[in-house]
Amino acid sequence: MADSRSIRGLLWNDDESRPRAPWRLALAVVLLVAGGVGGFVAASGITALTPNAAGPTLTAVLTVVAQVVQVAGFVAGLVAAAVLVDRRYLADVGLRPSPAWWADLAFGLALGVALPALVFALEFAAGFLRVTGTFVTRSDPSLGIGPGVAPVAALALTLGYFVGVGVFEEMFFRGYLLPNVAEGLDGWLGIGSTGALAGAAVVSGLAFGVGHGLNPNVTALALANIALFGGLFAASYLLTERIAVAIGLHVTWNFSIASVFGFPVSGFTTPVTVVAVEQSGPALVTGGSFGPEGGLVALLALVVGVGALGWWVRWREGSLEWRVGVASPSLRGRLFADESAATGQTDETGGRAETVETTKADRAPETDRE
């Protein structure tokens, strides 16, 4: 009997009503792969439905839809891992719906356009680029949008693709990885909540940089810059306990860099750009064929982004404070079990979710400025 309890203790955490961390991670990987396989099957079905005589626009639409569906499969796997395995609420992965969430998203979207515009202006003023055309389409096998597609349609499809990529990467690196690392570090070897949050931000940023290590034309500076931008994304989550700023900034940064101002983004080009440019100047500054993320110019944009984020959070929330709730989520089952033991009562009407949300609101109050 003792052996059975010992084995159970190695596999299951009774206090948290969920598997131990290593097994949660293993199950999360399984669900992520399963979601990816499901997305791949669905995407293959969409591709198979493409008529042989389809024109370039219809072919492009179905191709991009298939790619977004495949990415959505991975997102579904992550959400399943967070909710079913980690027993988290969506609020604990930064997805709490509220007016503040949507305001953060709008701010992130706007910042993701403003920072690339700053990069463009700096390089133009320095004489490192010249404009060679507007609304230029080009062949791009990675997205399957050919030159026969109208520029406006190509822009819309490219934006749709970047929405899928941005949501997935932020859900993975910030929504899933960051809170899990923060929770694991909190209390380990005497590390407090603040140290756990800082460590989690570093880990998620480094993982974000390493995740781009196989991109075309990548350099050490590019990986360092991307890791630092990952730190900015992490800070937006840790200061608000919402992932909205990170998603918005990620989506429009990629889209604006590549399809508005004509640079490569993380080593890739897109099938259309509002402004086509020809670059010159030192690659150390401009990033060369990797794009601005591979050059020193990205660091200037990063500094401005940090300042803008600080201003936004202070205005919205009233202060700049780490949200320690990221490292101590309100897990499904645990809070209810604790309260039931204390009061001798159970709630069979769904009231537990309200209790959890109230607790989180008390722990991390929000100021929703209309």
Image (cartoon, grey):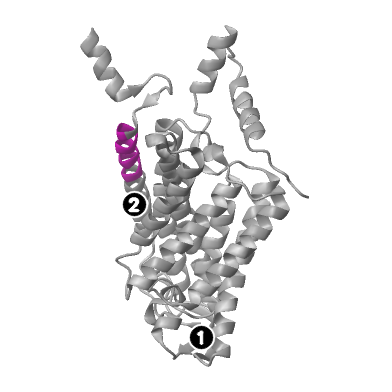
In the depicted structure, whether residue 289 falls above or below residue 203: below
Q: Residue at x 34, y 28 (%)?
A: 20
Whether 25 is among the magenta residues is yes
Q: Which residue is mark 2?
A: 40
Nearer the observer, 44 or 185: 185
Secondary structure of residue under mark 1: strand
Secondary structure of residue under mark 2: helix
In the depicted structure, whether residue 102 falls above or below residue 58: above
Whether 215 is among the magenta residues is no
Amino acid at pointer 2: Phe
Q: Which portion, as a residue range, is magenta?
A: 22-33
Q: Going from the N terminus, do you reach mark 1 or mark 2 first? A: 2
Instruction: Pinpoint residue 301: horizontal percent, then vertical percent.
Output: 55, 72
Q: Residue furthest front?
A: 190
Question: In the image, is 314 to the left or to the right of 340?
Answer: right
Instruction: Pinpoint residue 44: horizontal percent, then vertical percent.
Output: 33, 55
Q: Residue at x 51, y 56 (%)?
A: 233
